[in-house]
Each structure stands twice: as structure tokens, then as C-alpha cells.
Amino acid sequence: MSRRAETAAAAAGRARRRRGALLSAVLGVAVILASTPLSLLIADLDWLRAAALAAATVCGVGVLGRLALRPTILLPLLQGGALALLVLAVEMHGGILPTGGPADLLRGQVPLVTEGFTALTMEVPPVALGAEARAVLILLVGVVVLALDVLCAEGGWWGVSAVLLLCFQLVPALMHPEGAPWYVIAGPTLGALLVLGAGASHGRFDGRRAAVGVLCALLVAGAAPQVAAVLPTPARPALPLDIGSVTGQGSTQPLGPTMIDDSISVRRDLLQAEETTVLTYATDAPTPDYLRLRTLREFTGEEFVEGALAGEDPMPFTGGFSSTSEIRISGLVSDRLPVPAGQEFTGMVLHGGESEALMIQSGSVALAGAPRDLSGWQYEISGAAQEPAPEQLRGIDVQAAGAELPRGYLDIEAPDEVGALAEQIVGEAGASGGYDSARALEDYFHGFAYSVTARTPRGADPIQSFLDDRVGYCEQFAGTFALMMNHLGYPTRVSIGFTAGQSTGTSNVVTNRNAHAWPEVYFGPEVGWVRFEPTPATSGNGIAPPPIAPEDPGEEIPVTAPEAESLSPTTAPVSPSAAPSATAIPATEDPRSSAAQLERGALIGLAVALAAAALIGAAVLGRRRAARRREEGWEEIAVRGGGAQASRASAESARRAAGLLAWSEVQEHMRRRDRRIRLLGWTGAWGRPPRALRLDPSRPPAAAMEGLLRDAGADPAAPVHRAGARVADAVADARYAPEPAVCGAVDVGAVDGGPADPAGPAAAASAGSGADVVASLRQDADDLLALLRERRRP
């Protein structure tokens, strides 16, 4: 193969590798954009972190490898190795990296991957990632990115890669059928457009294609919110109180191990991304109370259920105050009417012409028949309530009051471990009696964290997992509180309903986000069922203290909370004086409030990705313009040299101009190299310390070129030395030799009988046609630039 063919092949290989590196970089940005549907499945911004880490690692190694390796056949192995190191680093950061030798490290990955995959597939979205799940998510995203990188950048199947990125839109369709924000559709679309644009350019920047691609991307991003608002969505009740079986509608996706019968669990409502209004109500009571739908009075050993109906609620009491509440339902499917908790019902009036048989059953108002859509129902309920004082509750023998309940009304027996912990809590708090015991348990649970995405591992006991992890949602707090109180002999049930909602001044608005579970303790016929609140209050969950009069400031309160961290079935007691204040409740951010954060994060991510794409496009455009100007410069000189019939003087003039152009290109490359060294010399990419290459302007062209090639480490016998000499000779002639006179196509020297070529016989003999001279010097310039690029590290 001739030198020219070898050079052309090398140039083609370099161009192919540069194009592969560009496609790999664009793919990394596209994957981050296309991962926006994961925001529906992963809580907070863990989806963005996982996608960014995986894409940066795999595509970053792909870009560097394609620019540095020849050939790139082993590059996927390097990318896979980098991904494995990333996963190990994430495991180390999470404190779950197996210890021991390499064999132990490999064997330990099996249970970690199994646990992480189970968490991702079995939990209710959005999933709060633990360390195992985070590592598995990064591994899965990284494998997808690696496969796409091989298809797109190595195999050139950028069209297939774009289609696969569009398939990310199936996530909301398959796993979030009730609808999704606009950005989960716009993200994969923009990512696919980026890959299509980069692949269709074939290594050349096409301004028209780029403009069309940017226009399409902007149209998608701008039209997605409007189109999403008018597209049909699956019909569903505003609140199937998921309570899915109660309504007969709603999701049937399993929640995993829980403490409340899945058919009446409120957890799904708390996890819904969309907030919907359930009802509005106005009351003349001093403080709006919770609204009860039903009560749970039986524990099966695994979960709380309603149990057999026990007739009318044993709730009558005397005294207190009368109140009237008007309730208007706007979105609820149920066979129960929401009624204020803690009241003895004295009357109910249905408005709108409804004629229904109503039954008061265990503190709830039941409708005859199956659950139905109650939207539009409006009713007024009257009742008597009171705000008992702590000293009044302390004076009641709650255990004796429980004996007055109908036989079988409560069927709740706590596991031994839970009972032992209850005794430890009240013992260390110095509590005696039902009220002080309930307050001690409240203070203990207020040391926990609240999260609706709390996860119970597969096969684990949800109660023990809750107590060990010290994080949970309202059903776990209410259920465990009820188990402990019943173990201590104080009759307690669990109620399901809503918190009081948000006040609008004249009424309260209750949404699905106010779905709640709480315990109620029976204090006898004079007081009735009294609500307690073990669930920690967090921003937006609407949790309020129980309707009990405040303590007398002058009275010494015997109940003090033990140190939260010290109480577990196996820990030693601590001094009651170390108890935290009831007002100093550590609260975590409500996961439900992360929806706006997710949208902001997605918008910021899209903006950053678009800005990065714009910068990449601008850089490519600048390089293409520079290449076009270079092409035009060489073509102009070739035209000046003429064809085979041109005079030798014209060819010599073109040779000198081509030499000067080649010289200027080498000088410009040296200036760019110096700028890069100033910015990135600390990386060691140009040696330590970096050595600047230059054409010394104080020396003759031949000596300056020889010095440059020597500093670049070129072999003295290499053909590039001859290429440098030809360029230097042409520059020396252009600078120091007389300009050849040209008249038409005939040399003036020939007409006068003088020499045909003032540059001398050697130059005239070697010149040939002007076009050949220009092409030869251009190839010499390409060889010099290729050497300087390859010898980046001198």
C-alpha cells in the first residue's frame, strides 16, 4: 500500500473513531433525558442520580476509549469493568460492600443483587431506594447504556438505538396507567431526536438537519403539557380509598407485607402522585376533628381487619357540647359515610332527596348494599362531643371500662415481643393507668420517622421491621400502638378515615392525601372513645393532636418519654430525664411533597441537557465551518495554479501559496495546543511537565520545521520529515525568492529568452501542474497535523 493510501486509511480510521466518540457522548445525554419516566417509579431524585452516574461512566469510558484505542474491539470490556467498579463504589458508600477476599466479594453480590431487585420489583412506586436497590438500579441502567453504546457508537445502528430510547415511554403506560406528567414523554422523545440527529449527520454537521431537529425538540417540549391535558385517560374514582376492595375499584397491585387489611389500607392513596378532593365540610365545633370511615377491631396475627359486626357502637357519654357538621362529598366510592370522630351521633339529615337505610356500626355510618360512588352526596350530622381533661382521664379505670364492652367486640392479641416492648416503655416512663400509658407510647413513637414508602423486606414481619427500622406510615403507628395498649389491658381499636384537611376559612377541604389511620382508646361510657396520635406530624400530612384539654401548667405530669433510641426489645433502660420534648418531634420530609421536586428536577435536567446539546452542536458547527474554510482556501490555491496547461510560473506561485497555507495550519494547531495546555495541562495529557511545541519564528523555515519534528519525537527516517522539508522549502521561496512574473499562460522569462522558472530548475522539474503541486502540499500538511495529533504526549 502506498504512503498516500496508508495516510488516507489512517485518516478514515481517525474520522470513524471521532464519530463514534461523538455518538457515545450524545448517547449519554440522550439516556439521561430518556430516563425521566423512572421518576414515576423511584422516589426523590435517585432516578436522575442513577441515570447520570451510569451514563457518565459507560459513555465517558466510551468517548475516551474511542479517541485513544486502536482498535476498539476491547472497549465494551473496559466499559463493563468501569460499570462494575462504579457499582462496588456505590456499595461501599452505602456500607453494604461484602468484606473478605475477591471470592467473598463475588459471592456477596448474589444476595445484594437479589435483595435490591426484590425491592425494586415488589415495592409500591415511588420506591425509596435503599443501598441494595440503588446499586442494582445503577447496574441495570448501566447495562442498558452499554448495550445502546455498542449498537449506536460501535455498530452504527443509531436508528435502532433511537427507537429503543422511545420505548422508555412504555414505563408510564405499563406501570402508571392513571397518567403521568408531560416530561416523562418529552424526555425520551428528546433523547431519541438527539441520537437521530447525531447519527444522521454521518460525521458531518448539517445545519438544516440540526435546525429541524431543534425545532422538533422544542415542539415536543412545548406541546407535551397541552396535549397531555386533553388526551383521554382511564376513568377512575377520585378516591377509591384504596380501600380498593371497599370501593370495588382501584389498583390491585400488592403492597407487600402490611399491618392493615389490604382491602382497606390507605397507603395507596398517600402514594398517589395526583392529589384529588374527596369532600368539603363545615362545622361549628371549636376545632374540626378527624373524619372516621370505619373501625378495625380484630388482629389476625398478621393484620388488622374489621371483624364481625358487634351492633351499635358502645360510645354514649354525657356532658360536653353539641356540634353540627355539614359534609359535601365530591369524590368517594365507599359503603360508609365519613363522620366526625369522637362524637355521639344524635341526628343526620340527607340532602338532595336521597332515601337510605343508615346503620351506626362500631362508630361508623354504614350504607346498605355494595360500595357506590358517593360523589354529590350532601348531609348534615349532629352530635355531642367533649374535650376531656387529662386529670379526668387519669381518674378512669380504663381496664375496668373495657370489661363493659360487648363480648368479642375487640379481638386483639399482641405478639410477645411487642408486649414486652410495651411494658418496657411504660415502665421506664413511670406511667400508670390508661391515659399516661397512651401518652408514653405516643412520645415513644414520635421518635420515629414518617414515610409512606417504608419498605418491609419480603418474608419479614412488618411489625418487627417497623420497630427495628424506626420508620413507617400511619397504619404501622396506629396498629402497633393498638397492639401495645391492648396487651397492657386498655381496650384500643384502629380507625380509618381522614384528617381534618385544609381550612379555607369557612370550611375544610379534604383530599386523598388526608387519608389516615389512628388508634382510639375506650375510657368508659362517660367519655367514650378518645383518639390518640402516635404518628409523627410532618409537613402536609394534616396530623393534629388528640382532642384532649391541655395539661394544667401548675400540675406535675408524671409521664415522661424515654430516650427514643434506647427503646427496643433488647436495649437497656435509660433515665426518663433524657426524654425529648413532645414538641421537639424529629420529622422527615414528606415523600409525597417530592412530586414538585421531581418535576423541578426533571425540568432542570432537561434544561441542562438541552444546554449541553447546544454547546456540543456549537462546537461541531465551529469545527465544520473551520473545515469548510480550509477546503475553500485549498481549492482557491488549486484554481490559481491552473491545470496541466498552466505556466510553470503559475504553478510555482500556487506552490508558494500552498506552502504558506500549510505553514499557517501547523502554527494554528500549535496555538490551539498551547491553549489546551494552559487549561488542561494539570491532567498530564501532554506530559509532566507539559512541553509546548512550536515553530520558532527566529529560525529559517527548514530549521524551524526540523526542530518541531524533533521535539514531537518523529523518526528522522520517517516520510513526515520529507513532507516537512517540502513545506519549509515552499515557505522559504515565498518569503525570500522573487515572485515569478506571469502573463496569461506564458512565462515572461521564456518570451525574453530568459530562464523559464526563476525558482530554479529543481523547482521547475518537481512542480508539475499547479493542481498537483497544491494537492501534494496539502497531503504534506495533513501528514504533519496527523503526526502532531498522534504525538499528543511528547
Image: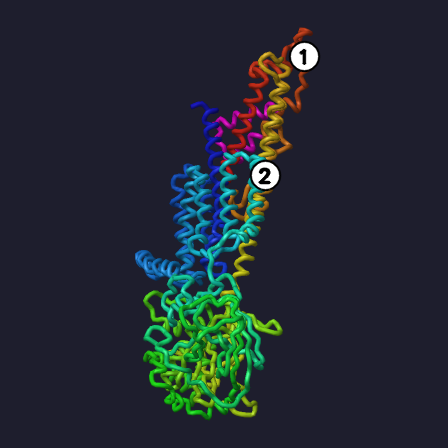
Q: Is residue 301 left or right of residue 277?
A: left
Q: Is residue 777 magenta?
A: no
Q: Nearer the viewer, residue 346 or 79?
A: 346
Q: Is residue 276 left or right of residue 124?
A: right
| Residue 353 visible | yes
Q: Residue at x 55, y 78 (%)?
A: 325
**Relative side of 730 to 478, left or right:** right
Amino acid, disc 2: Ala
* Image location of residue 585, percent across then percent down: 51, 76
Decide which of 674, 135 is in the foreground and name it.
Answer: 135
Residue labelled with disc 2: 211
Where does the magenta region start and end? 705-730
Q: Is residue 738 above or below residue 700?
A: above
Q: In the rendering, at what x and y percent does residue 42 appear?
A: 45, 59
**Position of residue 172 measured from the top left corner of the image (x, y, whole percent):** 46, 53
Q: Residues within 10 Å of mark 2 (few under 14, many from 20)?
A: few
Q: Which SS class for mark 1? A: loop
Amino acid carrying mark 1 in the image? Gly
Does 659 sit above or below residue 73? above
Q: Marks 2 and 1, how far apart in space? A: 46 Å
Q: Secondary structure at mark 2?
A: helix
Which label is found at residue 744? 1
Vertical side of 162 occupied by 279: above or below? below
